[in-house]
Structure formats: structure tokens, C-alpha cells
Image: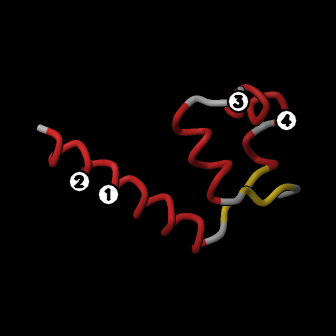
Amino acid sequence: MDYLLDTNICIHYFKGQFEIKEKIQQFGYDKFAISEITLANCYMEQRRAKEEIKMSQ
């Protein structure tokens, strides 16, 4: 691992913004990691987004 990704970068990755996915693929996935806190934050962001969708229906 050479790079530790923060929550914002992971969210941009999942949303397909700023060509993050392409940049990570360019370097190779094995060069990157996320912390347990970032993983938990991404999980909570996903739950929040699902709740927003449910409330808007």
C-alpha cells in the first residue's frame, strides 16, 4: 500500500466523479487502502442516501 484514501475520495469514486476510478486503475488497486473509519463512513453515507431515496418516494 502506497496511498491511504479518505472518505471524500471514496465517495467521489462511488459517484464516478473526478475520474478517480481511472486514476486508481492507472496506479493499480494494490497501491491503495482505506481505514476502518473510512469504511464505516462510506457505509453510513450509503445508508443515508438510501434513506433519502425512500423519503422522496
From mark 4 to mark 1, how far is it between C-alphas?
30 Å
**Which residue is denoted by mark 4 in the rendering?**
27
Identify the residue shown where x is 62% and y is 58%: 7
Secondary structure at numbered mark 2 = helix
Sequence-first disc among 2 and 4: 4
Q: Residues within 10 Å of mark 1 (few under 14, many from 20)?
A: few
Query: Which badge, 2 or 3, comes first in the chain's sequence?
Result: 3
Q: What residue sits 53% from the left and 39% below the top?
A: 14
Q: CA distance from mark 2 to mark 3?
A: 25 Å
Q: Which residue is under mark 1?
A: 47
Mark 2–mark 4 Cα distance, whole angstroms, equals: 34 Å
- Are the residues at dot 1 and dot 2 in contact (C-beta closer than 8 Å)? yes
Q: Amino acid at mark 2?
A: Glu
- Quadrant of the frame with the N terminus: bottom right
The Cα atoms of the two marked residues, 1 and 2, are separated by: 6 Å
Give the residue number, with chain letter if any, for mark 2: 51
Name the mark nearer the viewer: 4 or 3: 3
* In the image, farthest residue toward the bottom: 37
Residue for point 79% across, 31% down: 23
Where residue 25 sits in the image (x, y, percent)? 74, 30
N-terminal of the pair, mark 1 or mark 3, is 3
Residue found at x 71% / y 26%:
19
Circle 4 SS class: helix
Q: Which of the two marks, 2 or 4, is nearer to us in this view? A: 2
Mark closest to the chain's N terminus, 4 or 1: 4
How far apart, in angstroms, are the residues tagged by discs 1 and 3?
23 Å
Query: Would you place residue 10 above or below residue 4 in this image?
Result: above
